[in-house]
Image (cartoon, grey):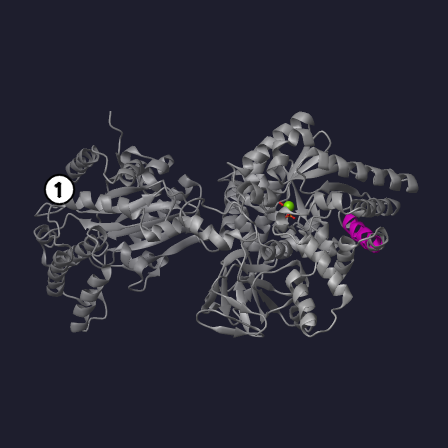
Amino acid sequence: MAPTYVYDFAEGGRDMAGLLGGKGANLAEMTRMGLPVPPGFTVTTEACRVFLESGEPPPELDRQIGEHLAALERAAGRRLGQVDDPLLLSVRSGARFSMPGMMDTILDIGLNDLSVLGLGRTPERERFAWDSYRRLVQMFGSTVMGVDSARFEKVLAGIKKQHHAADDTRLDTCDLIRLVETYQDLILEETGEEFPQDPAEQLRRAVLAVFASWNGERARIYRRREHIPDDLGTAVTVQTMVFGNLGPDSGSGVAFTRDPATGRPGVYGDYLQNAQGEDVVAGIRNTVPLQRLEDLDPASYARLRDCMRRLEAHYRDLCDIEFTIERGTLWMLQTRVGKRTSQAAFVIAGQLVDEGVISPREALARVDGEGLARLMFPRFDSSGTGDVLARGLPASPGAAVGAVVFDSAEAVRRSAGGERVVLVRQETTPDDLPGMIAAEAVLTSRGGRTSHAAVVARGMGKVCVCGAEELTVDPDGRLFSTPSATVREGTVVSVDGAEGLVYLGAAPLVDSPVMRYFEDGGQPPGEAAAQVVRDVHRLMGQADANRRMEVRANADTPEDAARARRFGAQGIGLCRTEHMFLGDRRPLVEAMILAHDEAGREAALNALLPLQREDFTGILEAMDGLPVTIRLLDPPLHEFLPDLTELSVRVARHDALGRRPDPRDTELLAAVTRMHETNPMLGLRGVRLGLVVPGLVAMQVRAVAEAVVARKRAGGDPRAEIMVPLVDTVEEFRLVRAEVDRVLERVSAGTGVTLDCPVGTMIELPRAALTAGRIAEDAEFFSFGTNDLTQTTWGFSRDDVEAAFFSAYLDKGVFRTSPFETIDREGVGRLVGIAVTEGRATRPGLKTGVCGEHGGDPASIHFFHETGLDYVSCSPFRVPVARLEAGRAAL
Ligand code: PEP
Ligand code: MG
């Protein structure tokens, strides 16, 4: 039997959105609820998929549409396009996920040169009939027959100009008749085909055009941004036309059952008298607030309010509604659970719990981490932003305003003087860290979402836009240029990290009370607190009660650790020790790496030891009683050594001038050349460094051990864990672990303090994941470094790819989101799953977590929950998001 491709509204329901699209499913639901819905039917997304795949509609479709149309005509007592009193139809798109305005709609199907006379059979309807007809010819001509819509607009503008008519409503019947004729001529001229007079043909072609609009450019771009799959297809609803433009007792409007901006209950919406729905959206005339309808048409208003109450009670959520009043009769044209701002999402969820409509658990499902993140950042007051100067990747959200600077030193200098600055670099390196700390925002012309700038900025909660390719950064000239402007140092710009946009000048900012709430340690807010803060507090409590996974933070300073704790972190999942070796300490690290004798190395290590011990003591104090996972040094080597090119130039310049180069430079050049790597990310880093540089592991472990001793002696409860990075094989881990154990024992024996520091490994290379069963023989815990695991599984350089070819890959549908942003379940995720299973087979109860950037990404957090990880670790500012999402994952 042929599949069912067409459903009458009375046959569907809201749970059929996959097949009927959101619009079709909700129209069916309203029909079943007995609300006043103009009758109609929906052609399924399945029929659309057949059409998109084969270029032809399913053979049974015509017959099925014909049967439903006949039923519709019988019920209406009129036929489609009937000459004396035509039944007219609207044909609208409706995908599973709302794609507002991205696909096509055709109204007034059924009108032709004869039925237009039937529709306009009375003098007062004449103008209306011809106006409807010209709308159909225009919409059909452009959408179905492919005539450029600008051509129609031009004709319309010409006629309006001739008649000095400010808007369409000033055109009289004769003008409209002329317009229809001119449009029809235009269609013939452009396509060689007449505008079809057969209503059945109009309907069939309109349905196919709506199918095809699924692949229109607008729709494709929107899907990409919203991560909507490309293969779903759209349903098509075919519905009896009702008219809001029949006079002052008619009109169209939109209504919300609560305020979608703030969440407050009440009547919200707009109404436009004597207008079709399109006119409301197009803003051709000014609408009035919905409440005014109470005066204009009290009976319809009362009916509408009743429908709104019933819909909200039925959907148990904010609904938005499109309606039309035709001569005093209310018709519901659409409803759906309405989109809302992040603030409204939290407030409405809280209200619905208070009203006893939903359970607290259900409320948790109604909010999300990205919404929470948006609530935490100060924002630009959207009315105050100016022209866009540049666009890049929205790498770290928030809004920042500052003077442009081009190097770290200038950023530090100006910010010390109280100036707010935006650091602009082609890309950042660890040397830029002081400048990044000093800056309000970081803007780079190269690099992706896991580039240095992005990772570090997110970690610090700094605004960052990266990979703004149209920017040419000229640090020597102290300016950057875009195709349209040149911006010199000191010029004030505004950076919107949530949208990836940069504006010239200072856009006004508004503060976030939600951020203040977290900064204050998430204390129960008082009565005076903003409603959104009280609802955030309540939902965070619900999430914490619900979640199985712990949430830790990636932090390398006592300040970050303390903040993470205030934000609710249950420990540190990753303390990147290389971040402690930057700035003033870099020469010591350089000396350690380049030392050519034992004594030189020991001197460098001895100088580093007390500094490291102090770092660790501070962090352990801030996280007293909670685990702190300290990772042994893991820098790609080039980050710690002088730049090879710069050094070579310096030496060569001396040579050229016939002067003897500084012997230190010559020596350094030889050493740096010796250690230079083409692929430092795959080179001497992580565990490899520890195995090659004698004394390095011992120094770091000793610093940890002595910090633990110091904290214990101070009456604290330090819980240090030692983690080995970039392990490929169990042999590497064993060698390092032996040294770690030796040092721990030595410090313990020397101080008489028992040291109980678990020693575990990162799993960030495919080989480690595949041999996790072996590694777990010796490692006491696993932490998945999904940044490197993604890099090495895909073979994508995490620093380069996003700028190089990701946008082409996204365009071509190779993936819908960057695998550096959301875990690739199929590949990288599979490796994580294998490692967890095999690790736990060797060591039951093996503690597992993730500390790559994915630890703060909502979709990835759900995956880690499903895979059985014990915790996620993310930057301090993402901790609330991770708590919320871990709670939602466990629903
Ligand atoms: C990782 O690779 O996921 C990780 C956390 O380590 P890093 O980002 O420091 O390489
Ligand atoms: Mg790593």
Q: How many marks?
A: 1
Residue 383: x %, y % from top left: 46, 66
Q: Is mark 1 within 8 Å of ligand 1?
A: no
Residue 501: x %, y % from top left: 49, 62
Residue drawn at the location 65% of the way across and 32% of the way down: 772
Q: Residue furthest front?
A: 658
Question: Magenta region, mostly helix, strand or loop?
Answer: helix
Q: Is residue 514 magenta?
A: no
Amino acid bearing label 1: Arg
The relative height of residue 162 versus residue 888 in the rendered view (above or below) is below
Note whether residue 145 is visible: yes
The relative height of residue 266 versus residue 862 in the rendered view (above or below) is below
Quadrant in which the N terminus appears:
top left
- Relative placement, left or right, of 454 versus 689 is left
Quadrant in which the C terminus appears:
top right
Note whether residue 891 is visible: no
Secondary structure of the residue carrying numbered label 1: loop
Observer-nearest of 382 and 361: 382
For mark 1, what is the residue? 78
Observer-nearest of 364 and 734: 734
Q: Which residues are magenta?
A: 605-621
Residue drawn at the location 76% of the way across and 50% of the way down: 619
Q: Residues within 10 Å of mark 1 (few under 14, many from 20)?
A: some
- Relative placement, left or right, of 827 versus 22 is right
- Relative placement, left or right, of 794 versus 279 is right
Residue 2: x %, y % from top left: 24, 27
Observer-nearest of 412 and 355: 412
Q: Is residue 613 magenta?
A: yes
Residue 649: x %, y % from top left: 65, 67
Observer-nearest of 783 and 607: 607
